[in-house]
Amino acid sequence: MQAKINDMTLAYSDSGSGQPIVFLHAFPLNRTMWAEQEAALSSHHRVITIDLRGHGESDAPLWHYSLDQAADDVRALLDHLSIRQALFVGLSMGGYILLAFYRKYADRMKGMVLADTRAQADTPEGKAGRFQMAQIAYKQGPSAIADIMLPKLLSPATIQARPKIVQQVRTMIEGNQISGIAGDLMAMAERPDSVPLLQQIACPTQIIVGELDQATPPADAKLMAEQIPHAKLAIIPNAAHLANLEQPEEFTKIVAAFANELA
Ligand code: MLT
């Protein structure tokens, strides 16, 4: 499905009925990373998955991107769908966007799941790495980004023994336009430190992390769990950064249990 949002086309899926759950994907993927969660949860919930600006079937305008703007896109899509409040699930960059969304639109959040993400801003080295990656995207294209990102996203065991998942992730990355990849990198590099926000978060929060996640390790998840009032933490064994793809059943079970508590 598609909607005209903030002067561009945003692609999304909307399936099932019941309490809405909105899923925001990681960098540099798209909404199909949530296929297993969508299939399992749409029997009891209205499940919305979104291709964020710059990704998948959404437009990837060549211009400045920011996480606040991504939050504005999500809010406008919720308005378009007449959804007043939802449970949000964001993984990695999706989690960064949830923190931006909370700053602007906390009243639209019934609860949030921060998965494989962190509250801290980029370090100077991290920002320099974003710049380098944008140059690689520009000069060599999305498949070079896939080569760099795959070992950061998936565990060595998955890379070795689960070629279907590896191919699925590669296809998602290669389907993005360079404008979207570079736009995300600029947006993530500019994001503020959200650690001071954590103690002010008043909506129910579930934190999830793959025990082998090196991009946003369990220590980052623990920091959020310690600072966000009443937050819960789940660590998924045998999963790295894309915990929802590597251990889909376990990930879905945690989200489903959290959604039921909010009902
Ligand atoms: C992601 O998975 O969204 C990225 O690894 C986040 C990041 O690069 O900080």
Image (spheres, rainbow, N blue to C red):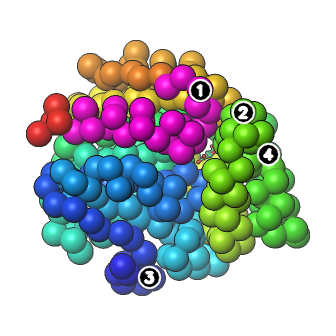
Q: Which residue is mark 3?
A: 9
Q: Which residue is mark 4?
A: 128
Q: Which mark is residue 129?
A: none
Residue at figure coordinates x 49%, y 62% from the top left: 32
User: Is residue 43 within the magenta segment?
Assistant: no
Residue 109 spot, x, y in % from top left: 23, 46
Amino acid of disc 1 = Asn
| Crowd tier of the residue under label 4, counting other residues whose Cα lies within 10 Å: few below 14, some 14–19, many 20 or above | few
Q: CA distance from mark 1 to mark 4?
A: 30 Å
Closer to the eye: label 3 or 1:
1
Give, as a single range, the part of the protein colored magenta: 236-259
- Between 234 and 97, the one lying in front of the other is 234
Disc 4 residue lies near ligand 1 with CB under 8 A: no
Which image quadrant is residue 208 in? top left
Q: Given contact means CB atoms under 8 Å apart, are the residues at marks 3 and 1 in contact?
A: no
Q: Which residue is mark 2?
A: 157
Amino acid of disc 2 = Ala
Q: Is residue 116 visible?
A: yes
Q: Which mark is residue 238?
A: 1
Q: Upstream in the sequence, badge 2 or badge 3? A: 3
Q: Given contact means CB atoms under 8 Å apart, are the residues at marks 2 and 4 in contact?
A: no
Q: Given contact means CB atoms under 8 Å apart, are the residues at marks 1 and 4 in contact?
A: no
- Between 19 and 197, the one lying in front of the other is 19
Q: CA distance from mark 3 to mark 1?
A: 37 Å
Q: CA distance from mark 3 to mark 4?
A: 31 Å
Q: Given contact means CB atoms under 8 Å apart, are the residues at marks 1 and 2 in contact?
A: yes
